[in-house]
Image: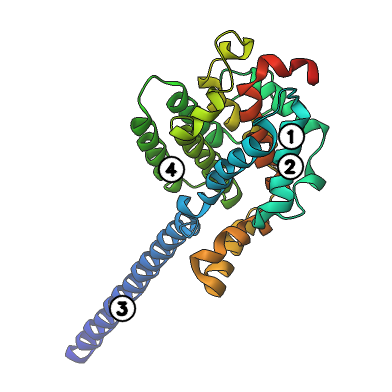
């Protein structure tokens, strides 16, 4: 009887041990699954961390360099200025002078870009009237609306530039695809550098061309910046596949450091970017002389 009781107690002890082991393993498996899910979630949020807004700032710098070229080669000394003068000078700069877009601007520029330029000149916002922005996601539109408020408000230049930097940080912390990030960062760069250019001494030579009795003097100069942005945004290529920008940046960093990134980005986006920046520069020049150019379109 005593032996039977001991056997029963031994069986209970073994069963209890097995139960605890199974429960422990099950809990460990659950924790592991939760950790994996968490890790995957983090990876999903951070896989585009390599795509930083400063990597795209070269496009705004190129925009301002293009403006200087257009002024010297089509505006200055031209008493019979027409739209094609501005467009051709801008195309020549980005097709034959600017190294990153050599032979990519003219072949990707079309009559549609001319229409974009004119509509951008007529707009009082970074969005053109009746423009088709179906290629943008809701999140992109959310950030672009914030940019529009920044650009068109009455704050001073330093406040606007600071707000754009803050906006870039918001975008960086989002879960947008790399091609969407590229479009927003480039648009913000054009905005930042255009604001800086038209608020600097460099703009004076443009303004001095138009005397008070000239109809172009009636142009709202605030629209110069919005026209820049509107034209670039509409002309920016929308067919860039997700993953292409991230891959280009990683490759550029590994092969040549940060100095190789602009070329890698342009290579991934394609010639459409050259046409987009050409349209932006053309829009700037055209707003400046808008009232004198309508008959030449």
Alpha carbon separation for disc pair 4 and 3: 60 Å
Q: Quick check: marks 1 and 2 in contact, CB under 8 Å?
A: yes
Q: Which residue is mark 2?
A: 91
Looking at the image, tell me whether mark 4 or mark 3 is earlier in sequence order: 3
Q: Which residue is mark 4?
A: 168
Q: Is residue 206 above or below residue 217?
A: below
Alpha carbon separation for disc pair 2 and 4: 29 Å
Q: Which residue is mark 1?
A: 87
Label 1 Cα neighbours within 10 Å, binned few <14 / some 14-19 / many ≥20:
many
Residue in the foreground of this view, choosing between 261 and 96:
96
Alpha carbon separation for disc pair 1 and 3: 85 Å
Residue drawn at (46%, 52%) of the image: 54
Q: Is residue 226 above or below residue 262?
A: above
Residue in the foreground of this view, choosing between 170 and 256:
256
Quarter holding the C terminus is top right
Looking at the image, tell me whether mark 2 or mark 4 is earlier in sequence order: 2
Q: Which label belongs to residue 15?
A: 3
Q: Secondary structure at mark 4?
A: helix
The image quarter containing residue 83 is top right
Q: Quick check: marks 2 and 3 in contact, CB under 8 Å?
A: no
Alpha carbon separation for disc pair 2 and 3: 82 Å
Q: Position of residue 70 (x, y in %)?
A: 65, 37
């Amino acid at each position: 009887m005593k032996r039977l009781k001991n056997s029963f107690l031994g069986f209970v002890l073994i069963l209890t041990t097995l139960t605890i082991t199974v429960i422990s393993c099950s809990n460990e498996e659950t924790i592991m699954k939760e950790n994996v899910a968490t890790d995957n979630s983090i990876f999903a949020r951070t896989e585009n961390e390599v795509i930083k807004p400063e990597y795209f700032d070269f496009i705004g710098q190129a925009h301002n360099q293009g403006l200087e070229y257009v002024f010297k080669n089509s505006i200055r000394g031209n008493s019979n200025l027409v739209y094609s003068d501005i467009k051709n000078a801008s195309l020549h700069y980005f097709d034959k002078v600017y190294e990153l877009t050599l032979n990519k601007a003219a072949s990707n520029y079309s009559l549609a870009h001319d229409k974009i330029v004119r509509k951008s000149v007529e707009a009082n916002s970074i969005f053109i009237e009746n423009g088709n922005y179906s290629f943008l996601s809701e999140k992109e539109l959310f950030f672009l609306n914030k940019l529009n408020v920044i650009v068109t408000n009455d704050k001073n230049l330093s406040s606007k530039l600071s707000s754009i930097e803050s906006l870039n940080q918001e975008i960086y912390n989002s879960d947008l695809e790399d091609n969407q990030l590229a479009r927003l960062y480039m648009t913000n760069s054009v905005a930042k550098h255009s604001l800086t250019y038209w608020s600097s001494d460099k703009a004076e030579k443009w303004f001095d061309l138009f005397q008070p009795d000239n109809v172009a003097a009636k142009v709202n100069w605030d629209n110069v910046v919005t026209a820049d942005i509107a034209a670039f945004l509409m002309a920016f290529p929308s067919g860039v596949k997700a993953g292409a920008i991230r891959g280009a940046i990683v490759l550029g960093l590994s092969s040549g450091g940060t100095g190789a990134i602009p070329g890698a980005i342009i290579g991934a986006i394609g010639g459409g970017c050259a046409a987009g920046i050409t349209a932006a520069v053309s829009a700037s020049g055209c707003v400046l002389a808008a009232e004198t150019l309508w008959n030449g379109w």
